[in-house]
Structures are given as C-alpha cells and as structure tokens.
Image: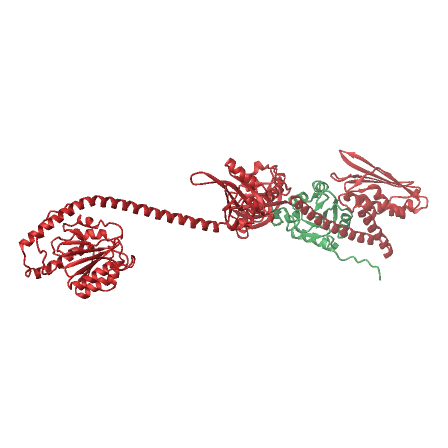
Chain colours: A red, B green
Amino acid sequence: MARGGRKTPRQGGPSRSKPPQIVGIGASAGGVRPLQVFFENLPEDLGLSYVVILHLAPDVRSELPSILSARTAMPVTTVDGVTELEPDHVYVISPDRSLRISDHHIESAPFDQPVGKRSAIDTFFSSLAAAQADGFAVLLSGAGSDGALGVKAVKEAGGIVLVQDPREAEHPSMPNAAIGAGMVDIVLPVAELARRLSELARSQAAQISAKLGKSDEELRAANEELQSINEEYRSTSEELETSKEQLQSVNEELQTVNNELKLKLEGVSRANSDLQNLMAATDVGSLFLDPALRIRRFTPRLTDLFNITASDEGRPITDFTHQLDYDGLTADATAVLRNLTPIEREVQTRTHSWYLMRLRPYRTIDDRIDGVVATFVDITERRRVNQALLDSEARVRQETRLVELAHTPIFVWDLDSGAVVQWNRGSEELYGYSREHAIGQRKNLLLKTSVPGSSFEAVSAVLAQNGRWSGELLQRARDGRELTVESAIELVEMDGRRFVMESIRDITERKVWERRQEMMVSELSHRVKNTLAVVQSFVAQSLRGAQSPEEFTERFEGRLAALAKAHKLLVDPWKGADVEALVREQLAAYAGPAAERLTARGDAMSLPADVAVPLGLVLHELATNAVKYGAWSSPKGRVELTWTRSERHGKPILTVTWRELDGPLVSKPQRTGFGSRLISKGLPHSRVRSEFLSEGVAYTIEIEVPEGMPA
Amino acid sequence: MSWTVHCAATPTLAGLRVLVVDDEAVIALEIEFILTEAGAAVAGPAVMVEEALDLLRDGTAISAAVLDVRLGGESIETVAEALFDRQIPFVFYSGQVETDSTLRRWPRATLVSKPAPSRVLTEAIRQAVDACPFSGESADQIDSPAPAP
C-alpha cells in the first residue's frame, strides 16, 4: 500500500456536534474501475464521509474495501450493522445489504425487496436526502436505472448531484437515466468528478472552518484510533491485494475466453446459416450419405432425381426410387468408400435429361472419411450444345471438303495483302497451279489478272460498297493460256481481316464461240449479198439473149434451180459436197429415167462450197447446151461424165470430163453467150478445154481444189 | 405486158480499161458485161489476188479497178496497195459491210454494195476516175491509206 502513512487528517475531524458531510457514491456494472479512479484523484483531507453503494453479488465476499484501499489513504470500512460516520472515511456496502443513514449513523440492513428488484442506490440516496440537505450524490457506471430516483431526492433536498460522463462509462445506462431525469448538476469523466468534488468541498469547508473548534486531545485520541484501524486495514489490504490481482487476471482471462467463445459461436451460427442458404440456393443436386449409405442431408434439387423428402433423412438411399437410368449408385458409393477415389459418370434420366454425377468421399475437417457425397449437375444443355457444335463442325468439314473437291474454281484471298489463303481442286485444274504453289502468292500477280474495260480500283470500290462484285476478268494460266473468266466475288470480314471469296467460271471457250458466231453471221450476210448479186446477174444475162419472156423465164429458172441445187448440198458449210451427189442433183432432170442417156462415174471426192456451187452452175450450162444444141437434142445422143482425183504439187486436182456422143453434128459457135463464158470462166483456179469433135462436144475441166478444205 | 428491154443511158466509160477482180465467176462475168456495155475494155476478170497482180504487172495500161473485198480466203489488200502505188483509182463492189477492216483502211474509196444496179457501179467508176485523174504530179490528192492497225 503505497499511499498509507498519514496518521492524522490535516484539516477537519470528527465533530460530535456537527456530523460530517456525506458523499453517497452509487455504482454498478463497470463501476469498480471508475471507483478506483475516483479515489485515486480524491484528496484524503476533505473532511467528508464517503459511502460507496455497489451492487454486489449477494453470496460472495466483497473485495471492494481492499481494492479501494489501494487507491486512497483514507480508511475503507465495510458497513455491517450500525456505524458512526467519520470524516475522511470510506464506507462500503456489504453484499446482500442495503444502507441507510439515520442521524450520525449509517445502518446496514437486509433488503426488503427480492434480488433483481433491489435498488440499493436509490434507497441510500433517499435516506441521504432525508438526513442532510447539503449531501453529495455521485453516480457512476452501471446498468439499469438505479440511482435516478435517489439523485432526484438529493437534488430536491438541496444537495449536489455529480454523474460520470456516460461516454466514459462502461455501462452508461445508469448515468443516462439520472441525466434523463433532469436532476444532475455536474457531468464529467470520473477523474474530473473527483477534482470538482474536492473544489466544492473545500469552498464549503472554508465557509464553516471558522465555526469549527478543534480539540487536540480528541484529535490525538482519534488519530491513534485511526492509526490502529489503519494498521489493521493495511494488513488486510496486503492480503487481499494479492487475491484481488489474481481474481482480476482470472476475470480478464475469463472475459477473453468468453469473447472468444462468443465469436466462435457467432462463426458457427453464421456457418450454419451459410450452409442452410447454400443448400437451399444451389442448383446442384447434392446428397450426403453416411458410411452405411444412409441419407444424412440433401439439397432441394436432389428431389428432382430421387423420390425423397426431408423426413427421409437417416434412411438408406437404397430404399428410394429414382429417375436415373443407372443402378450402380450403391456399388459406386461403396467403391468410393473403399478406394477413396472419386467417381464421375454422365448418367441419363428416364426423361432424357443428362446429369454429371460425381461421387467423392466425405472428409471431416480432421480428415476422417465419414461417408460419401454425391453431386448431380444437369448437363443436358451442355451436351446438346456440344453435340450441336460437333454436328456443325462435321458439316463445316463436309462443306469445306466439297469446296475443295469441286471442279468449279473457288479460292479465297486476303483483300489487304492480296495473298491466296484457299485454293481448291477446280482452281488447280483451271490455272495449273497446285494448292501448295498458290497459297501465299499474291492472287493478281499469280494469275496476271486484268479487268477488261475497268480497273482494280473500280472493282475494289464496288466491293467496299456492296460487299460483292461480279464481272469478266482476263487471266493467264500457268502454261501461258489466256483465260476469259466470269468472276463472282464476295467480301467476308473475319477476325478483323477482309477476305475475298472468289468463284470462277471459265468462259474462254464461250468467248471463242461468240467470236466465231459473229464471223459466221458476217459471212452469212456476205454470202446472201453475193448470192443476190449472182441472181441479179442471172436475171440480166438470161434477159439479154432471150427472144421472149418464156425463154427468159426458162433460162432464169433453170439457172436459179441449179444454184439452189448446188446450195442444197451445202447445208453444212463446213462439210463439203460430194461430187457424185452434185452431178446427180444437177443432171437427173435432163438425163431422164433412161440411164443410158448419161453415164456418170468418178472418184469419191468432197468439194468445198467455193468449188461446188460454180461447178453445179457449169454442169447446168453444159446440160442446157446439150439439150438445145448437143447430144440430148437428139433421141440417141448421150453424155459420158467422168471425174478423177489426182494431185499436183501436193494439191488435190479434180479433173471433170464431159463428153457428148451420138448427137447431131456440132460446130464451134460464132458468138460466145453467157453460158459458154460461164463454162470457161465460171470456175476459179481451173482450166477449161473444149473440143468440138464430130461425135459431139467434149469439155475437160481441171480444178485446183483449195487447200484447208475438205477434199 | 410488153416485153421491152430498156438500155438506160449509162455514163460512158469509153476509152477506159477497167480491171475486174471478183472470185464469184457469175458476178465477174456480169461486171465484165456491164463495163463492156458502158464502153470500157475489161482486164480480167481475175478471181484470185495473184491473177490480179499479174495483170497489173504485165504492163497493160489500166485506168480503174472494181474490187471485191475478199477472194475466197484471201484479202484484196495487196491488190489495193498495188493500185495505190500505181495511182490507179478503184471502187469496191462487195457484200462486206463498212466496218470490215480492209474497207476501213481505204475510207475514201467508194463502196458499192452488192447487189447494185449496173448504173450505180458505172457511175462510181466514172466518179473515181474523174475525181482522181492520176497524173504523176498530183499524188497528194489521192486517197492515202489509213495506217494499218
């Protein structure tokens, strides 16, 4: 006890005539610490009597006096029975007792009320108010509202009420109740309260000190008495200090443990709530089985698969039917318990849903195996998507393969770099570049592409605007062939790159045919005009020698028919006319049914139009001459017609011999008419020799058949 | 209906010697007849290019020419050039249309389209001869061939 030692209070002292001013101090839960602080900060010589009312456990011996003795030099006494109050003394309430003041005494008495309804502070403060008009009431930390009525009484009697600042109090409800009642003079932290009390007491004491007489004798006696009491308390205090400290540390430990437990309990409770919510919220069917495969717990979704309810917990899972197309749960769960390795299966339900089932051992926190956890995740959609993906991949592979194998040239190139990225079989066939060769090459350089009548810039502009273009291109194959193609291209953006898909139709041959057709049309026009000119000539020539319209008509129609017959054999201008067919056509009408009038034979030979038509006309003129003047003008006359094929300087030569026999005597005509001129000059590249023999006229016509024509 | 042959008063080509080149013998004979009727002498008719060139080379004086454009597979081109070299005027008598490449090379030579009335042909020859009296001194006035394409 550090602060002991003073034998006598310096000022004031017990006075028989005037009882000391009383300071009632009320405290409850959290009150011990403020009491210590209060007395630590309180001078010991204020001449006041301090009565401490603390709610104490009824059946435990209070250590409060010793605790307070450690903080003040003033004697601290537990009030038991009736005690006379002395200044600068501290009186402490006994457990399970109430305290009252009557006159100069303080009296301890059993409670009238049962535990829980006791209000020791109110009781004491009320008695204080009744006994002294100038008492002090101090109210410190505590739960409940004990003291609120008491301070009111003290205040009303004229005393002063001091209350610990609730913000400092461990349990502020007692101070708050008093403040709430509106009967409080001073609200301060405890240390300040003590100082304020001492100021109040000293100023009051100064007023009354003059009145106080002091008896040294009395003081001395009292002093000795006090000293002996002090000695007594000191020894007690020494003893109690130890146990107090011990108790305090135990208390602190207990508090710590308590707090920890509270936290743990909260944690457990939270974990339990979390678990409940998780089980309820999860979309995964989960089943917890004990080692005997009895149901321990399950999530609501599990009831989609197993016909179980909450009341089935504890029953073996094997007792229940389920929707799964799978009967191995018992065997698998047993295997998991035995091998401690998880098992995964994709199982189908009878309603064609698919679940991923996982069985794994249930491990406790201390790593004990205590059953099996089965989870069921609905993977119907995932499987469907997966299947769809596989199908679509297969389709893409098929389509890609089709494009690769197609004979239509199709290729893909990068619009920005120009590089070929795809090249199918059709492209290989058309251009002669293999896939390996073409890929990576710049398409326009590889194919030496040009756009007839336009430019790449124009094509690019259309492509950028419409996303597609089609038209004619000129390209070159690997072997140098120039190709005319019809290209259809489409722009496709993929991963930020612009690809051009190009499909090609080779129209080179079509173009050749188109040109040939143009030529044929022009040739046809030429021939028609030429033929008309020939007809015009027939008209003029036939008219010139004619004596009558009938003669004109006869000549003209004969020539026109000869021309038509010659052309008849030339329906296909690229095919020649056979000589024999030509002869038959031209001469059949003249020879008549009697075969002996005409003998015609020769080599098989085909003649081009340029030769066949004039030869037909020449034969016609020969025949009409024969009919008018020659062999066929007499009944016995006949004609021998022969033709042979030979070659001169590698060129085919047709030699036609027209020989008239057994006809009238002929002579060389005076004037050569159109017919004769036609015979001698009508055939290009030919030589005509005529002989007027006595038996009849003979012509030898030698024709050089142009090369490059069918012969 | 009375049958009367009217011989129209054709422009006389008297004194001219005209080369006829046409591979269609019937037509060539007809041209020959028409020109003879108009008083001209005829060189040919030639049915081939080579034949025509031979007639030009043999020194016979020729005052004009009637040319078909195509002779079988051959083009009349070299004959036209030979005539130009000799400053002999010529007309084309052909079934070809004007867009023909040979005709385009000789834009100022008259094209008489087949078939044509005889008078049209003889007038064309007369005009060609009158417009271009090929005297050696006036070569500038004659049609010059367009540059070959």
State the image quarter where residue A429 is shown: top right
Q: Position of residue B52 (x, y in %)?
A: 71, 43
Q: Position of residue A477 (x, y in %)?
A: 61, 39
Count of marks, rendered view: 0
| Closest to the observer, A513 or B134 | A513
| Closest to the observer, A381 or A525 | A381
Q: Residue at x 72, y 55 (%)?
A: B120
Q: Position of residue A614 (x, y in %)?
A: 80, 45
| Closest to the observer, B149 or A84 | A84
Q: Position of residue A515 (x, y in %)?
A: 67, 46
| Closest to the observer, A610 or B37 | A610
Q: Is residue A14 above or below residue A242?
A: below
Q: Is residue A591 above or below residue A200?
A: above
State the image quarter where residue A578 is shown: top right
Which residue occupies the extreme top position in the image?
Answer: A649
Which quadrant: the N terminus of chain A?
top left
Which quadrant: the C terminus of chain A?
top right
Q: Is residue A416 left or right of residue B145?
A: left
Q: Is residue B69 visible?
A: yes
State the image quarter where residue A174 is shown: bottom left
Q: Is residue A622 visible?
A: no
Q: Is residue B12 left or right of residue A438?
A: right
Which residue occupies the extreme right position in the image?
Answer: A636
